[in-house]
Image (cartoon, grey):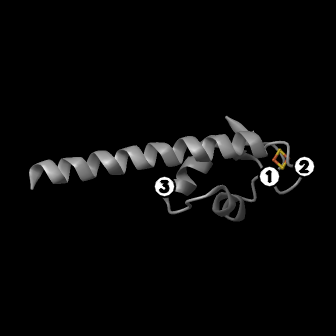
């Protein structure tokens, strides 16, 4: 779904940006220009960033636990 209509940015693009190395809303904003015109999308964009960062942390925690158990 579109998160930012002004820049044509979708939630999938925001997620991809995080998986490719962005680690904050600021990084995503600089990379995709999301929220840089009218700003109405900022709340939703921040929510998508937060949720995706949580997913990444959980995935990394699970990977770490698996390594710890395997060792
Ligand atoms: S909808 Fe994102 S800046 Fe306007």
* Other-residue count near label 3 (Cα within 10 Å), few / some / many at <14 / 14–19 / ≥20: few
x, y percent for residue 58 = 39, 44
x, y percent for residue 40 = 85, 42
Q: Residue at x 75, y 59 (%)?
A: 33
User: What residue sits right under mark 2 in the picture?
Assistant: 38
User: What residue sits right under mark 3 in the picture?
Assistant: 19
Q: Earlier in the sequence, mark 2 or mark 3?
A: 3
> How many tags in the picture?
3
Q: Earlier in the sequence, mark 1 or mark 3?
A: 3
**Is the C-beta of the residue carrying label 1 under 8 Å from the nearest atom of ligand 1?**
yes
- Mark 3, secondary structure of its residue: helix
Point out which mark residue 51 bears: none
* Other-residue count near label 1 (Cα within 10 Å), few / some / many at <14 / 14–19 / ≥20: many
Name the side, left or right, on which 68 lies relative to 31: left
Residue 51, quarter of the rendered image: top right
6 or 39, nearer to the observer: 39
**Is the C-beta of the residue carrying label 2 under 8 Å from the nearest atom of ligand 1?**
yes
- Mark 1, secondary structure of its residue: loop
Q: Residue at x 88, y 54 (%)?
A: 37
CA separation in Å, label 2 and label 1: 7 Å
User: What residue sits right under mark 1 in the picture?
Assistant: 35
């Amino acid at each position: 779904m579109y998160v930012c209509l002004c820049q044509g940015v979708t939630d999938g693009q925001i997620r991809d940006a995080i998986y490719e190395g962005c680690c904050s809303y600021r990084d995503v904003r600089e990379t995709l220009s999301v929220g840089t015109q009218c700003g109405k999308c900022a709340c939703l964009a921040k929510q998508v960033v937060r949720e995706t960062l949580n997913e990444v942390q959980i995935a990394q925690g699970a990977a770490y636990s698996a390594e710890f158990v395997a060792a």
